[in-house]
Amino acid sequence: MTKRTCLTFIAFLFISFASAACSPADAVDIQVSPKEIGFSGERAYAIEEDFVSLFPNRDSGQPNNRLAVEWLKENYESLELSCSIDEWEIVNYSRPVALNNLVCRLEGKDAQEILIVSHHDQAPDTIEGADNDGSGVAIMLHLAEVFSAGSQPKYTLTFVSTDAEEYGMIGTGRYVQTHPDVSRIVAGISLDNLGRDYYNSMNMELIGQFRGYGPIWLALATRAAAEVSGAEWEVNLRAPLDQILDQAGPISFMDQGPMVAAGIPAIGLAAGVPPEFQELHYQLWHDPGDTMQYQSPESLGQSGLIAEALVRQVLSMHEFPQQSGPYIYFDGSGQMLRGAPLWLLFVAFVSIFFIAAARLQPGSIAEKWQGFRSALPHFLSLWLPMVASLLLLYLMVAVGIMDEYHLYPATSKDAAVYNPRWTAIFIYVLGSGVFFYLARWLHKKRLAFARRPDHTSVKGLAMLIVGLSGIYVLVKNPFSLLFFVPLLFWLLIRGRSGWGRILEVVLYFMGGLVFYGLFFFFGFVIFDYQFAFGWFLLMMFSIQMIGFVTASLLAAVIAAGLSLVVPPAEHP
């Protein structure tokens, strides 16, 4: 059997194994009846109108924020729910901000808990904050009215009105972090952006905050419960490609994020926008135009019906599917790719770089090690300046040149995002240049007593570093290996000279294709930050929203690629 035939046979076996290993999604027996639904869009609209008119400008730390919490507490307690206010403090914009969570419980027969969350804070740029998230607040309070009017529920219903959602779901994170036993929470539901008059469907968000993805059984149960309950809206399920992208960059925008990251089965409900209203929708998001003018009882009614149907469905369940790990769900067939076959795909991909490293560096293990050692100073002269530049960002936060934030830098449409601190940028660029100059100078000095590595050794070490970084990603969040796929272009870099070096540089930059795509998608399409998105990314690193270890490994991958196109220093 030839080598090519052998590889083809192995690939055939692998694909056959992966295809056969797809399994049906966990089935949920739907028990909801339309007769049980008691939600009223008119009542939710009246609650929302009272709430946003009484408490405008209730962004985190403002007086109306606390007054809104006290008003909500009175309303929940009038339903005979037990309530408490959790008070704490964070630092945002380099100043202390007082926060308040309201936690209200409708005790069930069982100690297990269904968590329902909306946020009472609003973006600083809004006034009423009607849809975001007066709509969720109103729906949640009305759900408490509906369920408190009936018999004692099977599970405890916990209604949490959270603070600082606009600064990174901080209130929900606070609740799950201080919860005595999150394993008691059988399901979490986030309610946000649900009342505008042009909404026509329901979207479901499953993204965890920096890690994790909500279980598919909860999404399927939501859709099925809504259908049997008579919802007019279609409940949209994320397509397989969207699921991959969601899991590759798990930065959540709703309160289900911290719940999913804590291992809680959770889902975010946010209404769907018709294509013809997309531009208006973005204009109103985090804008003074987010008022009751665009809210409707009909949209609130459909949103509330779907939320109530989901809660009643979870209340009817005796057992809950135990689903963990990454997955891809195919709605057409009802099958899932998960478990060993999916992990085998991830491992096989990372192995490509280790195989390349081994094949590029010939000889015994000792000879391979010697080749890697010879290339290491060249790599370090490119990597260490990046790490030093990262530390420079932390220093600028510490001395006040850049702002300190608790978790996320500013909010969308915030002046802090659109107006970079040019002093900080100048210091960062100058400092980075100095670090690179010093590192390359030291590298050149070292060559007085060390041999200059050849391209094969440099490329072998670069592939080894990419492979080791891939293992870290594999452990932390395997779908993020999507960012590594374009790095396969680096295998085509061969140390060409002359005009060929231009091709080498092109191949190097092609390694960042996924990053460029996301930069454009979020910076230009979603947030409309334009190139100011680069400043937003810099702030993400400066406040360690992207932690030091992760940032250092990202720098290592970039430096590994640079080492392929930047020639090692010549002998002095």
Image (spheres, rainbow, N blue to C red):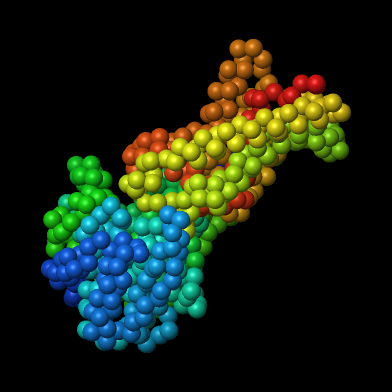
Among all residues in the image, which is located at the extreme top? 498
Q: Nearer the viewer, residue 189 or 566?
A: 566
Q: Which image quarter holds the N terminus?
A: top right
Residue 260 quadrant: bottom left
Q: Position of residue 545 (x, y in %)?
A: 51, 52
Image: 534 above or below 210: above
Q: Quadrant of residue 507?
A: top right
Where 375 falls versus 16 (above or below)?
A: above
Which image quadrant: the C terminus? top right
Name the residue nearer the viewer: 311 or 103.
103
Q: Is residue 251 visible?
A: no
Q: Which of these two is toward me, 291 or 439?
A: 439
Q: Residue at x 70, y 32 (%)?
A: 438
> Which x, y percent locates residue 434?
64, 33
Is residue 500 visible in the rendered image? The answer is yes
| Viewer-proximal residue among 110 and 276 | 276
Q: In terms of image quadrants, where is residue 168? A: bottom left
Residue 408: x, y in percent? 44, 54
